[in-house]
């Protein structure tokens, strides 16, 4: 079901390039609210330039960030003060999730790049008893509710970009930060598979083409 014409989509891309903002970072503070005030070890999967990993370091004794992109990982290292307990590693999250036990595992806008069930199973195996897994992911729009949220997100996206940039165009327009790769799984499919692997997980549809998943290991 096509909701927006190519012309409208191009206009949205131009607007987001002029007034850019990070749709994933929008959820970072929400992620922190799901976590304990202090915890020993954290793992951020798909850590990108390290923004979330650095926030986690404010609560954790040790944070590991992994990302498959060596360029963005090098950038994360450059941006991270040596005083923070954060280590960034180039690794494929589909196969190279570090061994060990983590009290917190986060994964933002990365899971749709991975084999879903295999990734969740691997995350579960790395989570310490009592630990918390928080995922912000992308789902394929399928139901009327999905499409309605997508429509609502369009003016909200424009307003957020305008406010975050204080109404001033970016001096150097950048690419749109909305999803750049379509997700294959619908939200219903994600819920169904998650319930089999992570019983009791809380999943919610969210604005800005995202859903959230929170699971605490017994």
Image (spheres, rainbow, N blue to C red):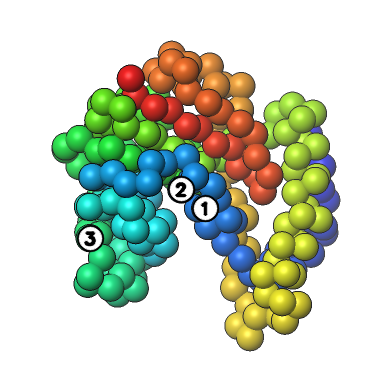
Residue 45: percent from left, percent from top: 35, 46
Give the spatial CA distance, label 1 vs label 2.
5 Å
* Residue 85: image tag: 3
Residue 40: percent from left, percent from top: 23, 45
Which structural element holds mark 1? helix
Say which label, 1 or 3, has the lower sequence index: 1
Figure quadrant of residue 96: top left
On-image quarter of the C terminus: top left
Query: Residue drawn 80% across and 46% down?
Result: 152
Figure quadrant of residue 26: bottom right
Asked whether the beta carbons under mark 1 and mark 2 sit within 8 Å of each other, the answer is yes
* Residue 63: image tag: none
- Residue for badge 1: 29
Which structural element holds mark 2? helix
Q: Is residue 164 above or below residue 57?
A: below
- Residue for badge 2: 32
Q: Which of 22 and 178 lies nearest the eye of the viewer? A: 22
Q: Is residue 171 above or below residue 138?
A: below
Give the spatial CA distance, label 3 vs label 2.
17 Å
Query: Residue drawn 67% across and 48% down?
Result: 208
Figure quadrant of residue 172: bottom right
On-image quarter of the N terminus: top right
Left or right, 45 with respect to 90, comes to: right
Q: Which of 108 and 166 lies nearest the eye of the viewer? A: 166
Crowdedness near tag 1: few (<14), some (14–19) or many (≥20) residues, C-alpha within 10 Å: few
Residue 104: percent from left, percent from top: 33, 40
Asked whether the beta carbons under mark 1 and mark 3 sit within 8 Å of each other, the answer is no
Say which label, 3 or 2, has the lower sequence index: 2
Q: Is residue 136 above or below residue 83?
A: above
Q: Is residue 80 above or below residue 4?
A: below
The reply to whether residue 218 is visible in this rendering is yes
Q: Which of 66 and 214 lies nearest the eye of the viewer? A: 214
């Amino acid at each position: 079901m096509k909701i927006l014409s190519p012309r409208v989509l191009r206009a949205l891309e131009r607007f987001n390039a002029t007034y850019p903002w990070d749709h994933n970072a929008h959820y970072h503070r929400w992620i922190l609210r799901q976590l304990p005030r202090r915890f020993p070890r954290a793992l951020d999967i798909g850590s990108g330039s390290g923004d979330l990993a650095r926030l986690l370091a404010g609560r954790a004794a040790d944070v590991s960030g992994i990302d498959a992109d060596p360029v963005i990982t090098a950038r994360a290292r450059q941006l991270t003060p040596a005083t923070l307990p954060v280590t960034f590693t180039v690794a494929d999250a589909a196969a190279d999730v570090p061994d060990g036990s983590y009290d917190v595992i986060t994964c933002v806008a990365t899971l749709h790049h991975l084999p879903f069930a295999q990734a969740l199973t691997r995350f579960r195996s790395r989570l310490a008893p009592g630990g918390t897994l928080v995922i912000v992911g992308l789902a394929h729009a399928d139901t009327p509710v999905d499409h309605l949220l997508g429509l609502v997100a369009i003016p909200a996206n424009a307003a957020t970009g305008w406010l975050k940039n204080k109404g001033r165009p970016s001096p150097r327009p950048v690419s749109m930060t909305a999803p750049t790769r379509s997700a294959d799984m619908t939200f219903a499919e994600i819920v169904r598979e998650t319930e089999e692997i992570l019983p009791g997980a809380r999943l919610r549809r969210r604005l800005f083409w995202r859903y959230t998943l929170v699971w605490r290991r017994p």
